[in-house]
Amino acid sequence: MMRHKTTTNFILLISVFFVVFFARCDADYMPKPYGYFRIDLPEHTYRHYDSLEKYQFEFPEYAFVTHDLNSPLEKNWINIEFPLFKGSLHISHKEIKGNLNEYLEDAHTMLIKHLPKANAIRDSLIIDSARSVYGIMYSIEGKGVASPVQFYLTDSTTNYVRGALYFNIHPNNDSLAPVISFLKKDILHFINTLEWK
């Protein structure tokens, strides 16, 4: 008699479970939106870099400077590496010999390559007569843009520097927006501390 009651209770419990489980399956499925990992951003602290022949600057403590391995003959071409964010700021230097317009056109051409993926391009004029630093910084907005920040700087007579921020991951600038905004402050600090030698 006891066994019959236990079996009946078990069957009743299983039946209730299946009714509740399958009753919920009739509801419309609503997928959850994709989430992004939380990114812990360090404090903005900087150190001086004075190992190049043509210019010096300050860069973040959480980054390191490497020479551009793809251009071994160019002693003033460097990368500022951000390992925490899998990003690099590629910086090239050219000496002006009456060909500044050629370099400016090259910067414009590199910028135009991002137009198919860009939603907007915002530019900021850079004029610092005290340091003889003039140029433009471009913020390139768009989910699939490969280089969200680019700039060029010149003293208009001797030196020309071009920089571009790249990430070593498939570009998804919606999820990278906090990092791009964070690194933009570091790029502005680079621009504001750059001095020609």
Image (cartoon, rainbow, N blue to C red):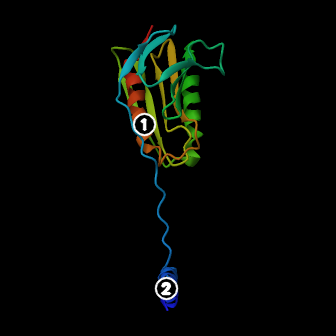
Asked if 176 appears above or below 3 in the picture, the reply is above
Q: Residue 6 got which mark?
A: 2
Q: Position of residue 101 (x, y in %)?
A: 55, 23
Element assignment for label 2: helix
Mark linked to residue 144:
none
Q: Residue at x 42, y 45 (%)?
A: 38
* Kind of residue at disc 1: Asp
Q: Observer-nearest residue: 126 or 186?
A: 186
Please name the residue shown 50% across and 79% down the image: 21
| C-beta proximity under 8 Å, tags 1 and 2 | no
Q: Amino acid type of disc 2?
A: Thr
At a point 61% along the width and 20% down the height, the residue shown is: 68
Question: Vertical placement of 189 versus 113: above or below?
Answer: above
Viewer-side label of 1, 2: 2
Q: Residues within 10 Å of mark 1 (few under 14, many from 20)?
A: some
Residue reaching furthest to the front: 1
110 vs 46, left or right, is right
Q: Nearer the viewer, residue 28 or 57?
A: 28
Quadrant of the rendered structure where residue 127 is? top left
Say which residue label 1 marks. 123
Residue beneath the point at 49% across and 92% down: 1
